[in-house]
Image (tube, rainbow, N blue to C red):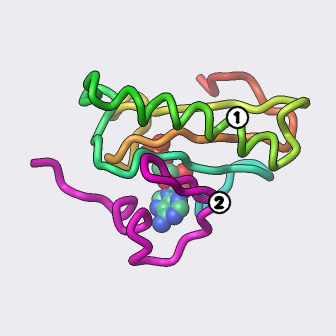
Amino acid sequence: MAEETIFSKIVRREIPSDIVYQDDLVTAFRDITPKAPTHVLIIPNHLIPTINDITEADETALGRMMSVAAKIAKEEGIDEDGYRLIMNCNEHGGQEVFHIHMHLIGGRKLGPMLAK
Ligand code: AMP
């Protein structure tokens, strides 16, 4: 059984967080250390530790994560200029929190896709 992270507590509103969207499948909240004017994390409400753990049963939640990303980008006024969606997996991907999350980053011109 995978260990819960702080993100499960955010979903249940047990700790403070700047939640911008929540429904029965996903929660979106502002990253605590934003890398750009808009930096929102979109997560499934149920715990999936890494992208490697995704199963077919998760596909509805994963699809919702994408549509919610587009909705938030529009609300933030960054949809036309553009933005980036990032999901990190395990050590080489730089994953720090083991509850999958999609970073929605924008509000300024972003640099090259990979730092190196
Ligand atoms: P990753 O490296 O892809 O696992 O990204 C984890 C992200 O979670 C980082 O950008 C952190 O700043 C962010 N983060 C960690 N704890 C919190 C929190 N309590 N509320 C909001 N964002 C958080």
- Tell me: is circle 2 under 8 Å from ligand 1: no
Decide: is 12 above or below 31.
below
Under mark 1, the amino acid is: Ala
At which x and y percent is residue 12?
A: 38, 69
Tell me which residue sits at (61%, 56%) in the image.
21
Side of 96 relative to 113 (left or right): left
**Label 1 vs label 2: CA separation?**
13 Å
**Range drawn in magenta:** 1-29
How busy is the neighbourhood of tag 1: few (under 14 within 10 Å), some, or many (20 plus)? some
Tell me which residue sits at (52%, 35%) in the image.
64
Tell me which residue sits at (38%, 26%) in the image.
59
In depth, the one of 77 and 104 nearer the eye is: 77
Label 1 SS: helix
Q: Which label number is shown at residue 115?
A: none
How busy is the neighbourhood of tag 2: few (under 14 within 10 Å), some, or many (20 plus)? few
In the picture of the structure, the residue carrying the numbered disc 1 is 70
Under mark 2, the amino acid is: Val
Q: Which label number is shown at residue 20?
A: 2
Residue 5 image-quadrant placement: bottom left
Tell me which residue sits at (58%, 31%) in the image.
66
At which x and y percent is residue 55?
A: 25, 25
